[in-house]
Image (cartoon, rainbow, N blue to C red):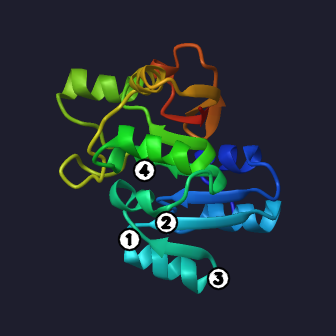
Amino acid sequence: MVLRPDLAVIAESVAPGSRVLDVGCGDGALIAALRDRKGCDARGMEIDPANVAECVARGLSVIQGDADKDLAFYPDSSVEYAILSQTLQTTMRPDRVLEELLRIGRKAFVSFPNFGHWKVRTSLLWNGRMPVTRLLPIAWYATPNIHHATVNDFRDMVRERGIKVEQAWYLSGDRRCSPAAASFRAEHAVFLLAR
């Protein structure tokens, strides 16, 4: 199975044999890849019951839970990596969820859509409307995205909290792009964070 570009970056970077918690794991594609390709003890939490059922039917260790409420039940430093891919912008309090990820995991991967990308800016400037694109395919009134952050917003948030950025990757479409002007050029970003 071919992984979504941000998930492929994460899968490449996770150390073999690691304990991993994927919060907002969706259909479990990353969990399966980490288990099968890297021998990881990969588990997931997902809010959508249909996705949970699909994951369990595929033999994946996934529970139903809400990142905003249920991360508190996980013990400190219980995994090497806590992962939040394309979920940060859907949480009620991204700052608190990020703190929980770094409490549970020694390191955290976070990926999110960059709402500062030039196509988003252009759509707002010329059309006066929130964009609907291949990577943001849902109209503003039906989207699960409730926080529209940019790469620079995220960098500011982690700096204010004393969180270390160990590595960052920027994606334009399905390809990686340079960090130069990433807040303008990248459609998605992936960060590896630590305390």
Marks 2 and 4, how far apart at CA? 11 Å
Quickly name the residue at label 4: 87
Badge 1: residue crowd in 10 Å (few <14, some 14–19, many ≥20): some
User: Answer yes or no: do the residues labelled 2 and 4 have beta carbons within 8 Å?
Assistant: no
Q: Position of residue 144 (x, y in %)?
A: 29, 53
Q: Position of residue 53 (x, y in %)?
A: 48, 82
Residue for point 59% across, 26% down: 164
Task: Classify mark 2: helix, strand or loop.
Answer: strand
Q: Position of residue 191 (x, y in %)?
A: 58, 34
Q: If you read the primary sequence from the N terminus, does the residue marked by circle 3 or circle 1 appear first?
A: 1
Viewer can see residue 133: no
Marks 2 and 1, how far apart at CA? 9 Å
Quickly name the residue at label 3: 59
Quickly name the residue at label 2: 45
User: Mark 2 or mark 3, which is nearer to you?
Assistant: 2
Q: Quadrant of the C terminus?
A: top right
Left or right of residue 66, residue 105 in this image: right
Task: Classify mark 1: helix, strand or loop.
Answer: loop
Quickly name the residue at label 1: 48
Marks 3 and 4, how far apart at CA? 23 Å
Marks 3 and 1, how far apart at CA? 17 Å
Q: Is residue 16 above or below residue 9?
A: below
Q: Nearer the viewer, residue 124 or 95?
A: 95
